[in-house]
Amino acid sequence: MTDTLATGAARSDRERVLGRRRERVGPGGDPVAPGASEPRRQPEDGSGVVLDCGWGRLVFGQTFAEQVEVADVLRSEAVGARDICVYLRDPHVLVSRLPDELFIDPSLTYRLPLGEHRPAATESGEIPGLAVRPLRDAGDADAVNRIYARNGMVTAPVDVLVDNAGTDRFLHLVAEDATGEVVGTITGVDHVAVFGDPENGASLWCLTVDFNTAPPGTGQALLTALADRLDARGRAYVDLSVLAENSGAIRLYERLGFHRTGALCVKRKNPINERLFLPAMPAGYDELNPYAKIVADEAMRRGIRVEVTDPRWGELRLSIGGRTVHTRESLSELTSAVAMSRCDDKRVTRRILTEAGLSVPRGRTATGDADDLAFLADVGPVVVKPARGEQGNGITVGVRTPEALTAAVELARRFCPDVLIEELREGEDLRVVVIDHEVVAAAVRRPAQITGDGVHDVTELIERQSRRREAATGGESRIPIDDMTREVVAEAGHRMHDVLPEGQVLAVRRTANLHTGGTIHDVTAALHPAIAEACVTASRALDIPVTGLDLLVPAADRPEHVFIEANERPGLANHEPQPTAERFVDLLFPGTRAPRRLWSPAGAGGAA
C-alpha cells in the first residue's frame, strides 16, 4: 500500500540495506543465529499470516488472535527491512503498550472499489509506447531494485522478487518503454490467495517510477493494469496507503475514485522509519532544495542537530557534542577560500590540473582578436564558456566559424568578463564525486531528450518532459525552450511543431547540464581505475575535500579521459543510491562514521 509516487517510502539506511545480508533479530533485539528457525512461518490455517515481500514483511493483523503475537512478529523484523502490520484491530492499543518500539504510520489508507462499483476513471490507462507486463526474471528484478534505490526505497533480494512474482499471491508488474527499459513498477497482493480473505480484498504496494525516463502517466497506467487483473480475479477492492503530507498523490487517487478508509498501519521504530516518528523537522526544512535536504536527512539520521539558517540558500548549521559545522549543500567550512577560488575560475583549474600531470583539452583565454581565430583554425570546433559561472550559463558547444565564435564570446561575457575557449573533445559527460580524496560516485550525464508518441509535437513533448523533470528534482531541473533548443532540434532535421513518430528519441540540448533537463546515470561500479586515480590526484592538487569533477570520456570503463572543470559544490542528491551524503557527513563528523569499505579498482564504487 505504501506508495512512492507519493514519496512515502523512508530513505533506506545504506549501511544496513545495500550489499549486506539481512539478519533476523529476536524479541530482545539480538540477531537470530544463522541456521536458527525463522520467527514465524506461513500458517496453513490462515491465522497469524506474515508475507515476505523482500523489502520487508506484511503482517496481516486481522489474522492474529492476540496483539502480543503481532508484537513478537514485529520485534523479529530483519535488520535493514521494513515490516508493516496492516488491518490490525485497535492498533492504538498495541502502540500505547509499546511506545518505545512501535508507532502508528502517519499515512492515510485509500480504497478503490472493483467490479460493478469500479470508477470509470481507472478503466483506461494506456500510453503509446509503454507496455505493462508481469515481472519475469532476475533482469526485471534488478531493474526494479534500481528504481527502488533511486527513489530512496528499501531494495529486495532478486530471488525473492522473482519467486513472489511466480505465485498467485502477488501480482508484480513492471512498465517497459519503447526501448525495452523498465521504467516503473507496482506490486499487488491478493488477500484471498494469501489467507482466504472473507472480505475478498487486495492491496497495492511499491508503486514507483523512474522519474528520469518514465513518460507522464506511467504510474496511473501501472495502477490501472493492476486493477484490471484484480478485477478479473473477482476481487472487491484494492487498498493503498499514502503519507498524509503527500497532497499531490492524494489528489490523483481521489480523482481516480479512491476513497478514504479507517485502516491504520503499525511499524517498528527502526532507522529506516526514523523520519516518520521523530519530532517535527526543523523550521525551514520543507523549503530546502534536494541538495541541502539530503545532507539534513543524513545528519538527523545520526542524531546530529540540524538548524536551517537560510533555507533558500541551502545553508545549515550542524551540531553534535561540542562540534558545529556550517554547510551550504555540499560546501562546508572545510573547503578553504583558496580551494574554492581554484574551482571557481576554470582557467586556474586547468593550470593546476596540468601542473599535476593531468589531461585537459587545449584552450586559451579569449582576447577578441586574430589569435582567437587562429586557435579556432588550428584545433577545429571549440567550446566557449565563461571563466567563472555555473549551471551551464553562457556556454556554447560546437563553435565552428569566426562569426559563431564572436557571438559565443559575447554571450559568455554576459556572465563573466573573462572567457575561455577550449578545444571540443568528443565523449560522454562524466561526473565523478570525490569526498575526502576518495571516489564516492560516478555518473554519466546526458543531454535532455524527448521520445515521440505520434501525437504531440516537439514543443509539447519538451514542455511535458520539462514538467516531469522539474517535479522529480524539486524545481531544480527544467528544459528551456530557447534559441539553443530550437537550433539543436533544427540540426536534427526537425521543426518545433513536427510530430515525432512513436518511439523516436530526439536530443534537444547540446550540454548535459542537469539544470537544463539533463539526466544522470550511475556508472560507479564500472569506473576505470585510471580515471578514479586521476580524480583523486585532481582533488589533492586542488586541495579540496569535496568536489565534483567533470570529464569527457569515450566510456566510463575505459582509461582515456580529459578534465573539463571542478565543482566545489556538487549536487549529492544526483548520485543516489551511492552514499554521497553519508560520506559527506563522515567528513564533517568523523566520530559518527560507521565501519565501511572504501572504493576499490575492482569496482566496489564506494558502496558500503
Image (cartoon, rainbow, N blue to C red):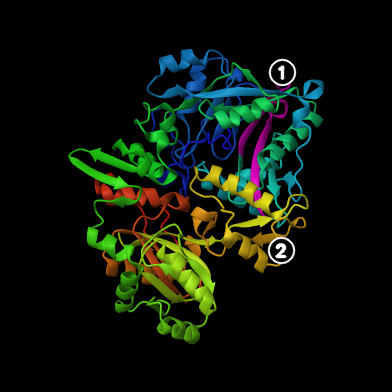
Q: How would you rate the neighbour count of disc 2 (Cα within 10 Å): few for under 14, some for 14-19, many for 20 or more? A: some
Identify the amino acid type marked 2: His
- The residue that label 2 is drawn on is 494
Q: Which of 204 and 543 is in front in this view?
A: 543
Residue 427 position within the rendered picture, expressed as x and y whole percent measured from the top left:
53, 72
Choose the circle earlier in sequence order: 2 or 1: 1
Q: Is residue 584 left or right of residue 114?
A: left
Please determine whether, in this image, residue 183 is positioned above or below residue 6: below
Residue sitting at 48 percent across and 84 percent down?
A: 379
Circle on res. 199: 1
Q: What stretch is highlighted in magenta?
A: 181-207
Q: Can you see residue 554? A: no
Residue 41 position within the rendered picture, expressed as x and y whole percent measured from the top left:
58, 31
Please determine whether, in this image, residue 551 is positioned above or below residue 290: below
Residue 360 position within the rendered picture, expressed as x and y whole percent measured from the top left:
40, 76
Q: Which-is-in-front pick, marks 2 and 1? A: 2
